[in-house]
Amino acid sequence: MMTEIISSNDKKAMLRAAELIKRGETVAFPTETVYGLGANAFDEDAVNKIFEAKGRPADNPLIVHIENMNMIGDIAVGIPDDFYTLYEKFMPGPLTIILHRGKKIGDKVTAGLDTVAVRFPRHRTASELIKKSGCPLATPSANLSAHISPTTARHVYDDLNGRIPLIIDGGECSVGIESTVLDLTGEIPLVLRPGAVTLDMLRKVLKEVEQLNKYSPSDTGLFCNKSPGMKYRHYSPNADLYIANDGKDAKFLYDTALKDGKKTVIIAKAANAALYGDRNILTIPDDSKGYAKKIYSLLRLAEQSYGFIVCEKPDLSGSGESVLNRLIKASNK
Ligand code: TXA
Ligand code: MG
């Protein structure tokens, strides 16, 4: 199939995008975190097309995206007070909440689980598409399964050209990494995937909330049970990826790979760029917010020309820890 790219400012084309959703097709669109690939969450055949286009394993559930609270009753049941507290504080925004599944949500979306993930994105184009489509959209990131999430329409095209009918181009995503996933169905609220809404931010509004620390590989088993997606290699470039703690570390990794004859590059924070002499570098903003926004596009750029990527660790303030979480999952360790 031909994949068309339209502008989010083109009102007529936006109506066509909504028509495609109504007809049970998939459409890629921007959110504030990353680009998503959406389909009518109440239509199992449409949802199946998402899995096919991405090559996504059927046991990895999707997030249901909404643009107001009217449909929540069809999507989830037994909604706890904490949800409304979080709604007031963080929605719309980069936070996904796991609730008990409602009756209109089928097995494909949830991969057979009795829970469902719900997110209310902050991006104008996402809201407009959901509203015009008249249904919630089951929407994973719009990349081929296991590849890096897309933060521009071009990234989506590079992965899914010929596999989906339409991509809405709304420019570069502002956050740059996927939403925080918070499970409200267990004994205490639990962060399954860290993101721009950090544990510290959640602690300010919830009485109790925990985050399983996934930095150690021995923790992964715990995550697998809770969030099926966690067991897959994720966010990976088509190249070896190593994380460097500092400039010395980065130089060592780079020089070793170079000796092995590998085409190598360092993703270096701007402040450190001068350290690297004539080595190949791509610069990334020093602050954790800027770093998060650019990391996926730099990894995509790097994988096009290099087989070995050394990435300087982000500053760990704010969403930096969440970015490090993604890098560790993408890396060779
Ligand atoms: O920012 C985002 O969340 C983006 C944009 C497009 O909204 N979406 C996204 O979707 O990152 P995806 O499918 O790439 O990641 C969803 C994660 C997966 O790890 C999945 O396993 C988990 O959420 N998930 C979905 N439903 C779940 C459920 N019922 N219980 C536990 N984890 C769930
Ligand atoms: Mg994804």
Image: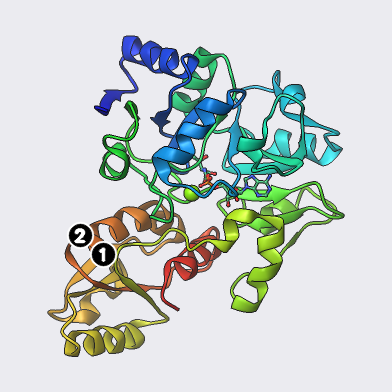
Q: Are marks 2 and 1 in contact (CB under 8 Å)?
A: no
Q: Viewer-proximal residue, 107 or 72?
A: 107
Residue in the image at 83% along x and 52% along y: 186
Residue in the image at 37% along x and 64% along y: 286
Report how far apart the C-alphas of labels 2 and 1 lie in the structure.
16 Å
Please name the residue that numbered disc 1 is placed on: 283
Amino acid tagged 2: Gln
Q: Is tag 2's residue or tag 1's residue first in the polypeptide sequence?
A: 1
Nearest-to-viewer mark from 2 and 1: 2
- Lateral position of residue 258 relative to residue 155, left or right: left
Q: Confirm if mark 2 falls within 8 A of ligand 2.
A: no
Residue 27, above or below 70: below
Amino acid tagged 1: Thr
Q: What is the x, y in percent for residue 14?
A: 37, 16
Helix, strand or loop under label 1: strand
Q: Viewer-proximal residue, 97 or 323?
A: 97
Please name the residue that numbered disc 2 is placed on: 304
Residue in the image at 34% along x and 40% along y: 172
Quadrant housing the C terminus: bottom left
